[in-house]
Image: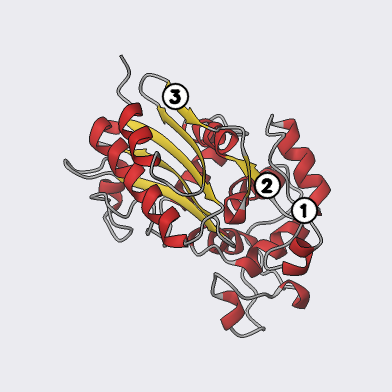
């Protein structure tokens, strides 16, 4: 019998008002539990994970330099999450730091710039298809509400995203170095109000040794959130003391209140943690 608490999760979500996609994997034994894994949702900022992968691949292949200053195009500057829209326009961070801002602060300006750097929507979508993620698609930039009105949105599924995280955690997403870089950035995530919210997490200001091997009674969470118009998502890789790991990819949509999605994600995360810790 598996350790993932399937009946407890189903009981909790039986009262949930909205759509749910869920993928949970215990990386120690390969056990997987899914709910609507192929249901397509607006991706919100979860799409930034594979976008980071493509940027790192281009750097590995010598197509771009991650470490030289990069001038941000004016039409890529947008609001929403992130900090670049608040900073002096003369500030030209490297692509490495644009990537880091895209993940740990979900910076939309950084994301829009990176979309251009990697070659736009078509190249990103071909990249995802080549890796087997056929339901992952990028069709608009961040904060392009007019595009949404015209029917252009970005899409992912909880199942594909969960499998992507599984490959990342195992060092098999493109290659080991890129996988490790993605995990390191996700471990520095600043938005902790969903999957990590009810857990005894290793704080982002912890010593490096505690991030490599979480102290007893704690869990290291590397996550990426997403939210837009009645949609709340969070996906992450969890490491327990002794190196035991698991994955949760949870998407919610058609929410009357965003707080309902946030609460459901945080409580599913707590149930899984209590069973696997």
Kindly indicate the quadrant of the structure image that contains residue 188. Answer: bottom left
Q: Residue furthest top?
A: 1
| Colouring of the image | secondary structure
Residue annotated with mark 2: 155
- Residue 139's disc is 1
Q: How many marks?
A: 3
User: Residues under labels 2 and 3: Cα distance?
Assistant: 22 Å
Q: Earlier in the sequence, mark 2 or mark 3?
A: 3
| Crowdedness near tag 3: few (<14), some (14–19) or many (≥20) residues, C-alpha within 10 Å | some
Secondary structure found at label 3: strand
Q: Image quadrant of residue 13? A: top left
Q: Which residue is mark 3?
A: 32
The residue nearer to you, when weighing 134 against 213, is: 134
The tag earlier along the polypeptide, 1 or 2, is 1
Mark 1: give few (<14), some (14-19) or many (20+) Cα within 10 Å: some
User: Which of the two discs, 3 and 1, labels the residue nearer the N terminus?
Assistant: 3
Residue at position x 27%, y 56% from top?
206
Q: Quadrant of the C terminus?
A: top left
Q: Quadrant of the N terminus?
A: top left
Q: Is residue 9 visible?
A: yes
Judge left or right: residue 202 versus residue 158.
left
Front-most of residues 60 and 260: 260
Q: Secondary structure at mark 1?
A: loop
């Amino acid at each position: 019998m598996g350790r993932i608490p399937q009946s407890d999760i189903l009981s909790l979500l039986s009262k949930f008002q909205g759509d749910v996609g869920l993928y949970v994997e215990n990386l120690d034994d390969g056990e997987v539990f899914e709910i609507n894994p192929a249901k397509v949702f607006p991706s919100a900022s979860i799409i930034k994970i594979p976008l980071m992968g493509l940027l790192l691949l281009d750097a590995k292949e010598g197509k771009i330099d991650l470490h030289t200053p990069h001038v941000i195009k004016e039409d890529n500057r947008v609001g929403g999450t992130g900090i670049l829209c608040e900073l002096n326009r003369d500030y030209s961070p490297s692509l490495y730091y644009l990537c880091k801002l895209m993940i740990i602060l979900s910076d939309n300006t950084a994301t829009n710039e990176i979309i251009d750097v990697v070659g736009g929507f078509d190249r990103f979508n071909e990249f995802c298809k080549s890796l087997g993620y056929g339901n992952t698609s990028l069709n608009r930039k961040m904060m392009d509400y007019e595009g949404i009105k015209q029917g252009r949105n970005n899409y992912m599924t909880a199942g594909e995203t969960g499998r992507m995280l599984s490959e990342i955690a195992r060092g098999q997403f493109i290659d080991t170095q890129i996988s490790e870089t993605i995990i390191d950035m996700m471990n520095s995530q600043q938005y902790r109000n969903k999957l990590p919210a009810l857990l005894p997490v290793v704080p982002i200001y912890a010593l490096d040794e505690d991030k490599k091997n979480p102290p007893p009674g704690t869990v290291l969470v590397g996550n990426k959130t997403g939210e837009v118009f009645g949609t709340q998502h969070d996906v992450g890789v969890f490491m327990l003391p002794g190196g035991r790991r698991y994955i949760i990819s949870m998407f919610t949509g058609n929410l009357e209140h965003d707080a309902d999605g946030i609460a459901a994600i945080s409580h599913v995360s707590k149930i899984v943690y209590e069973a696997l810790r």
